[in-house]
Amino acid sequence: MFAGFVRRWSNVAWREPLRSAISWLVEANSPQVVMESKIILSQVALETLAWVHIVETQRLHSRADFGRLTAAGRVRALLQVVGIPMTVPDHMTLLPILCDGDSADGPGVITRVRNALVHATEEKRSFIEAIDDPTRYQCSQLGLQYLELCLLGICGYGGKYAQRGWRGRILTDDEVQVPWAE
């Protein structure tokens, strides 16, 4: 992976987005950071990577087309290009209760929660208040897993990675092949 990282880092278009995304990932992994911040940080990093990868370097969307996508649509586009499934992982059993409309998959869930946190209307504050801590935790872990996988994929990694588990427990199949290399 390091060679792929260096290749991306050598590209001026990638240097600052990589630095920011990695910085946000490190910050979000701090035990002192609250779950809501983890969700917001991962979403911001994913949208940054999506713009650079899809619009600036791969040129798969024009600026205008990408701008018309919803936040969830931008994350979906990135996951699709990298080869990451958009479904909520089976072990994140609490997240399906957050699925609704455009939020019927993983990118939709994390974006729905992030938007409710950032655009705090009375209705959205009520939605956030109704989400218990274990569900918030799973949402934060899904966002961070997507971010880790995107960074690995963008840097050309093709090996195994450790899935994010539930409550710190290691899953029986914790270390798995990255999805785009299966």
Image (cartoon, rainbow, N blue to C red):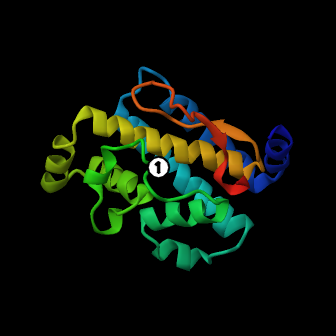
Give the side of residue 84 with respect to residue 88, left or right: right
The image quadrant that residue 135 belongs to is top left
Residue at 30 percent across and 43 percent down: it is 94
Residue 178 in the image: state x and y as whole percent.
67, 47
The image quadrant that residue 99 belongs to is bottom left
Few, some or many residues within 10 Å of mark 1 (<14, 14–19, 20+): many
The extreme front residue here reads 172
Which quarter shows the C terminus?
Answer: bottom right
In this rendered view, identify the residue nearer to me: 179 or 42. 179
Q: How many marks?
A: 1
Give the side of residue 130 with respect to residue 161, left or right: left
Residue at 56 percent across and 67 percent down: it is 77
In this rendered view, identify the residue nearer to me: 145 or 88. 88
Secondary element at tag 1: helix
Which quarter shows the N terminus?
Answer: top right
Which residue is identified by label 1? 43
Image height check: is 140 above or below 31? below
Residue at 64 percent across and 65 percent down: it is 81
The image quadrant that residue 109 belongs to is bottom left
The amino acid type of the residue labelled 1 equals Gln
Residue 11 in the image: state x and y as whole percent.
82, 53
Residue 12 in the image: state x and y as whole percent.
79, 53
Image height check: is 156 above or below 34? below
In this rendered view, identify the residue nearer to me: 177 or 134. 177
Residue 166 in the image: state x and y as whole percent.
41, 32
The extreme top residue here reads 32
